[in-house]
Image (spheres, rainbow, N blue to C red):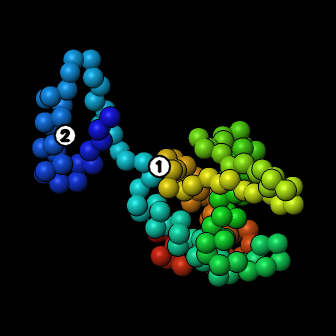
Amino acid sequence: MRRFILAHAEARRRAQQAVSEAPDGFVVAIGAATKRRIQEERYHALIDEIAAQSTYAGKRWDRENMKRILVDEFVDAMKQMGTPLRQSGQLIPSENGQRVIQLGVQTRDFTVKEASDFIDFLTAWGAERGVEFSEEATT
């Protein structure tokens, strides 16, 4: 399968050529990309401010760890609402049984809707904990 991001004239030309050369019975689909860059920028801004202004389990976490925590909370919230994500995390025991390993959900694989729901979740999560979001994070 070939995939073209229609970002410039050359990409469009190659896509048109691929369509022209495709055998009968092949399918072409054109649609919006998964998760938009603007959504990614927004949820990262929200996560940064949540990490800077709140604690989780009695501790302040850096942005990368807070992101993992919030994604896990989001996955659980979506399951509880009856709208689980396409991908799901999983907890497994380590081989020696001494630890729990989190196999996580990746935000890079979010659909546009999942990214939008994540932004809504982050906004509500932070608001419940008194996080004051900047204009950058909320626009």
Q: Secondary structure at mark 2?
A: helix
Residue 104 picture quarter = bottom right
Q: Nearer the viewer, mark 1 or mark 2?
A: 2
* Amino acid on which disc 1 is placed: Val
Provide residue 35's location: percent of width, then percent of height.
45, 52
Check contact, mark 1 vs mark 2: CB within 8 A: no
Residue 49 visible, this angle: yes
Q: Which mark is residue 15?
A: 2
Provide residue 20's location: percent of width, then percent of height.
13, 29
Who's the residue at 15% across and 37% down the image?
A: 16
Provide residue 45's location: percent of width, then percent of height.
52, 73
Nearest to the observer: residue 127 or residue 72 = 72
Nearest to the observer: residue 108 or residue 54 = 108
First in sequence: mark 1 or mark 2?
2
Provide residue 128's location: percent of width, then percent of height.
73, 68
* Amino acid on which disc 2 is placed: Ala
Q: Secondary structure at mark 1?
A: helix
Who's the residue at 65% across and 78% down the image?
A: 62
Q: Which residue does the numbered mark 1 point to in the structure image?
A: 112
Mark 1 to mark 2: distance in Å? 23 Å
- Give above or below for 102 relative to 85: below
Who's the residue at 29% across and 38% down the image?
A: 2
